[in-house]
Image (cartoon, grey):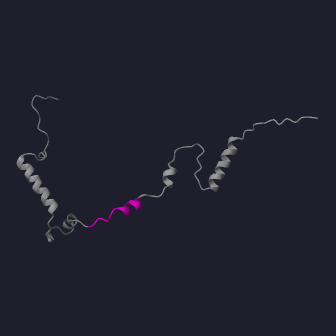
Amino acid sequence: MPSFEIKHVKMSVPRERLVALMKAQCQVFASTFNPEGIRMGNKVLRQRLKGPALAAYYPRKLASIKDVKREFGPVLATWDDAEEDRFEYIEELKQRGKSAPKKKKGPPAPTPGKKR
């Protein structure tokens, strides 16, 4: 009785055929065709935007005293307690000599002994 031996023959599929299959697969499933595997950021770009969620989390900004002052100027007399407290604090620092130094005006003075 003749015995049949099954030989496993490995057949390799040409790369062009695999690339064509990948291309068709990407068209069917609406994914990005990227055979070289280049990093393109599609994973990040597919995600939902976070802006609307963050904007909804924080309360809307109301008009501040600064905004009213800027809008109406000298026509309307306004009083900003926080700003007045800040000015008071700066004055106290100046009296003790602990405030920020004055800004320099004009070009720097030439130093004697230094030649170019």
The answer to if 49 sits in the magenta stretch is: no
Q: In which quarter of the image is the N terminus?
A: top right
Quadrant in the picture for residue 84: bottom left
Residue 89 placement (x, y as % from top left): 11, 54
Quadrant in the picture for residue 85: bottom left
Residue 25 placement (x, y as % from top left): 65, 52
Q: List the single residue furthest toward the front.
A: 1
Q: Which of 6 and 73 is in front in this view?
A: 6
Magenta stretch: give its range.
51-62
Q: Nearer the viewer, residue 39 or 70?
A: 39
Q: Nearer the viewer, residue 75 or 41?
A: 41
Q: Residue at x 14, y 66 (%)?
A: 79
Q: Viewed as shown, does residue 15 lie left or right of 96?
A: right
Q: Which of 56 and 38 is in front in this view?
A: 56
Q: Quadrant of the C terminus?
A: top left
Q: Viewed as shown, does residue 29 lie left or right of 102?
A: right
Residue 36 placement (x, y as % from top left): 58, 42
Q: Which residue is drawn at 23% across and 65% down?
A: 64
Q: List the single residue furthest toward the left.
A: 95
**34 relative to 11, above or below:** below
The answer to if 52 sits in the magenta stretch is: yes
Q: List the single residue furthest toward the right.
A: 1
Q: Which residue is drawn at 88% across and 36% down?
A: 4
Q: List the single residue furthest toward the bottom.
A: 75
Q: Viewed as shown, does residue 40 lie left or right of 87?
A: right
